[in-house]
Amino acid sequence: MKILHLNTYAGNGGAGKACLRLSRALQKQGIDSEVAVNFLFNSNPEVHNLSNGFFTKWLTAAGIISERFLNKLFVKRLPIPFSIPLWGKNLSKNQLLSNTDIIHIHWINHAFLRPADVAKLVKLNKPLVWTFHDSNAFTGGCHVRYTCNHYQVECGNCPVLKNSNPSDLSHRIWKKKSTAYGDVDFTIVAPSRWMANSVLESKMLKSKHIINIPNTLDTEIFKPRSRTESREKLGIAPDKFILMSGFMPSRKDLHKGTSYLIEALEIFAREHHIELEKVELIIFGNRDTKDMPDFPVKTTFLGTISEEEQLAICYSAADVFMAPSLEDNLPYTVMESLACGTPVVGFTTGGIPDMVQHQVNGYLAEYRSSADLAAGISWVFKQSERELLRSNARNSVMENFSGERVAEQHIRLYKTLLNEHISA
C-alpha cells in the first residue's frame, strides 16, 4: 500500500507539521508513505518538490504572492485568513500521483490546488482522502469562521469582504467549490469532533463520507523532561509559577485571544491575591516584540523556536500552558504541551475539548470568559498534586494521539477504501 500526501508547504504551520508527522508515523508501521509539496523554502530530502526548477519555482512563488495581493484588494484588514483560488496545478498526469495507491490531500491553498484541480484528480482513478486542517474547503474563502454560519447555505454577504452582497466573491467561490466537488468521491478526515460537526452543517459537503481521526506527533520528542533542567536551559527562575503560551502578535489579534489572556492574568492577580513577582509569562513563536501588549506580569519572549527538541524543553519548563484561542481545529500547541506533561488551560472551543479533560489534565474555561480563564489558572496554581496532573496530561496523549494509534486508524481507513475501490 503506497500513500502520497499533498500539502502546499513542508512543515510550515499546523497542517505542514501534521502532514509530515502522519507520514512518519505511517512509515513506522511499515507503510510506504511519501509527501509532495507545492513549494519548498529549503532543501528537504524527506519530501518531493512539485515546483522543481528555477522557472517553475518562481512561477509558483508569483502565484502565491499574487493571491496575497488580491486579498488586499478584496478583503478587509481583519485578522481572518481568506483565500482566493485563482492559480493552481493540474496534477492529473503527474507520475508521482499515478504511481500511488491512495492520494491524501492536506492543506492545498496558496496557488496549489483549486477546486477544479481537485476535481481533475478523479481521472487518476485513485481513492482520495482529504484532511481538513481548517474550514476553507467548505466556505467561500475564509479559513476561520468564528460565529459566521453563511457556509451552511451558500455563503454571500461575507463580513470579511470589502464589497459584500448576496452574490459577492465569497458566494462565487462557494459555487465553484460546490460544482467542482459535487461529482468527486472523497473521504473527509476531520481531526476534531468540532470540525466533523462543522462539515455536517455545511450545505456543500455534508453528504460526503466524514471520519474523525486526530493529528499526531512524535511522543519520543515531545515527552516530559526535568522541569529544573529545562528552566536552567531557558534561564527561567526555578521557584516561579510559569505560564507559557504561543504566538501573540497583538492585543487586537482575534484568532489567538490575546486580550482574554491579558484580562485573565489581571483577574488572577487581583482576585486571587497572588504576588506578581512569583508569576512569569513565557511566550514563544513571536517574530518580534514591536506590537506586543503590556502584560500584567513579567513576560519573557523567546522568539520563534523551530527545533522541536527545544520546543519540548519550553513546554517542560512551564507549570501551565495557556490556550486562549477563540477557534482552532486541533491546535498542536495544546497536544505538544500535554505530551510534555504540562497541563493546559483553554477555552471550550474547536478541538481543544478533544484533548483537555476538565480538571483532569487541565481546565476548560467558558468560551470568551476571562474570569473563567483566570479561574483555570488559579485551579492549576493551587493544585497540591501537580505531578498527578502532569502524569494525566502525558497519559491522555499516549492513549489518544500517539503516532502508533493515529497511524492505525488511518491504515484501517486506507484498507477499507482500497477494498471498496477494487470491488467497485
Image (cartoon, rainbow, N blue to C red):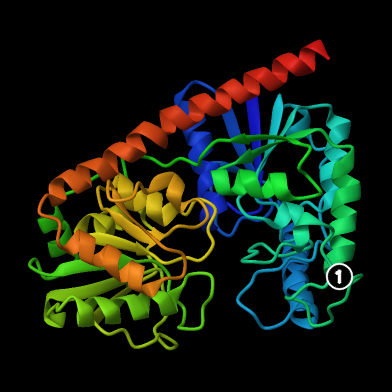
Question: Looking at the image, which residue is at 50% across and 20% down?
Answer: 30
Question: Looking at the image, which residue is at 22% across and 61% down?
Answer: 379
> Which residue is disc 1 drawn over?
169
Location of residue 31 with respect to 353 vertically, above or below: above
Query: Residue 85's image quarter?
Result: bottom right
Residue toward you, 35 or 380: 380
Residue 410, percent from left and from top: 56, 28
Instruction: Give the side of residue 403 with respect to residue 16, left or right.
Output: left
Residue toward you, 313 or 375: 375
Instruction: Give the side of residue 350 with respect to residue 88, left or right.
Output: left
Question: Looking at the image, which residue is at 54% across and 53% down?
Answer: 329
> Total marks drawn?
1
Question: Looking at the image, which residue is at 56% across and 51% down?
Answer: 16
User: Furthest residue to the left?
Assistant: 239
Instruction: Give the side of residue 268 with respect to residue 152, left or right.
Output: left
Q: Quadrant of the N terminus?
A: top right
Residue 169, percent from left and from top: 86, 70
Residue 149, percent from left and from top: 72, 62
Q: Is residue 55 visible?
A: no
Q: Quadrant of the C terminus?
A: top right
Instruction: Give the side of residue 203 with respect to residue 44, left or right.
Output: right
- The amino acid pointed to by label 1 is Leu
Local crowd at mark 1 within 10 Å, few (<14), some, or many (≥20)? many
Q: Is residue 225 visible?
A: yes
Q: State the SS at label 1.
A: helix
User: Furthest residue to the top?
Assistant: 423
Residue toward you, 386 or 221: 386
Residue toward you, 316 or 220: 316
Location of residue 424 with respect to 205 vertically, above or below: above
Query: Residue 103's image quarter?
Result: top right
